[in-house]
Amino acid sequence: MITRTVSKNPRTTRGDLVNDLQRAGTKVTKATISNTLRRQGLKSCSARRVPLLKPVHVQARLKFAREHLDDPEEDWENVIWSDETKIELFGKNSTCRVWRRKNAELHPKNTIPTVKHGGGNIMLWGCFSAKGPGRLIRVKERMNGAMYREILSENLLPSARALKMKRGWVFQHDNDPKHTARATKEWLRKKHFKVLEWPSQSPDLNPIENLWRELKTTPASRSPVCTPVSKPATCKPRFS
């Protein structure tokens, strides 16, 4: 019963199971429930956060997958992937593990300080292909459609040339309003850039997300939050 219940509803708590069994005439403890589920290969984990997918998003992603299912590897090597991201000094990017004793979780040596609004951040635009990283640009002001087109104008083609992309290379960006604005689409058309049609709510399909992860965790690992230093450390974000 316990395994069947959590299989149907993974959000069922041990307290819920205790109450259900008690109403059925069986008295058990939460520890017994945990041990029973563990023997079945089930353990309590934090639920992953994923984009909210409506039926229309699911259908679009499925259509995208079917259309590109048989694409040769060479086609994907001819794509320039792009995106914007924010890197915070204090926040989700500042993570580290510590060895500590029981009840010592709040000792200053075992904590990561947090501040409101991340304590400062930078916005970046970047791109890359199978051949390597393209340009990485810091966005110093709030980005709008005009600024986005300016960034593409100054950095997209030079990145393609530096990467020695083959003729007919394809540009990818997501469905952010700045990217899908009529003026941006018209600019891309006039420049004769071929754009990869992209399903909405699909950040996990863009391999640049893995590159952002590396970019964020590397500076965070050098932060004084985890490693005391005698003077301010400097690091230049780079793809590696």
Image: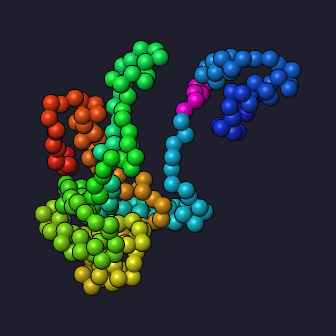
Left or right of 86? Residue 41 is right
In this picture, is 135 found above or below 7?
below
Residue drawn 43% across and 18% down?
104
Coloring scheme used = rainbow
Residue drawn 18% across and 72% down?
154
The reply to whether the magenta stretch includes residue 44 is: yes
Q: Nearer the viewer, residue 152 or 74?
A: 152
> What range is drawn magenta here?
40-45
- Residue 29, image x and y in percent? 72, 17
Is residue 210 among the parts visible in the rendering?
no
In this picture, is 34 found above or below 184?
above
Q: Quadrant of residue 195?
A: bottom left
- Residue 40, image x and y in percent? 62, 24
- Residue 203, image x and y in percent? 42, 57
Left or right of 51? Residue 164 is left
- Residue 38, image x and y in percent? 60, 22
